Amino acid sequence: MSQPFKVTEGSLFQQLWQTQSGHCALCSKPMLRNRFEAAHARVWAKQRATVDHITPRSKGGSDAPENLQLAHARCNKIKGNQV
Ligand SMILES: [Zn+2]
């Protein structure tokens, strides 16, 4: 079986994480990378790192790495609500 040549979500995540040094693109605070870093599932649900589209797909934003950043699940949701 040959591996398809494409950037997997996992490696893209690693790349963005390193670029942003584990900090949220929206509020600049540290994000949680691993489920086990969170004291509670509720904390994890809000503070985990999620992939955010800088220009929302609903506004014609692409899935290209240049249009992607990492943000807290909570911040991502707030931003989504504002658009
Ligand atoms: Zn944030």
Image: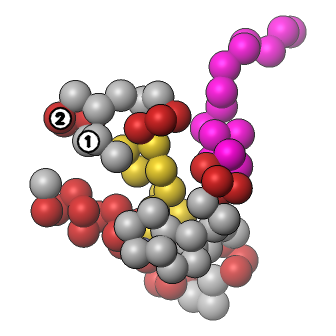
Q: Residue visible at 47% across and 83% down?
A: 42
Q: Please tell me in which quadrant of the rendered image residue 4 appears.
A: top right
Q: Which residue is mark 2?
A: 59
User: What secondary structure is found at the residue carrying circle 2?
Assistant: helix
Labels 2 and 1 touching (C-beta < 8 A): yes
Q: Is 53 situated above or below 3?
A: below
Q: Amino acid at mark 1?
A: Pro
Other-residue count near label 1 (Cα within 10 Å), few / some / many at <14 / 14–19 / ≥20: some
- Residue 76 placement (x, y as % from top left): 34, 62
Q: Which residues are magenta?
A: 1-15
Horizontal side of residue 54 vs 31, given as left or right: left
In this picture the colour scheme is secondary structure
Find ligand 1 in the image and state its quadrant: bottom left
Amino acid marked by disc 2: Lys
* Res 83 → quadrant: bottom left
Q: CA distance from mark 2 to mark 1?
A: 5 Å
Residue shown at 19% from the left, 36% from the top: 58
Place residue 7 in its image quadrant: top right
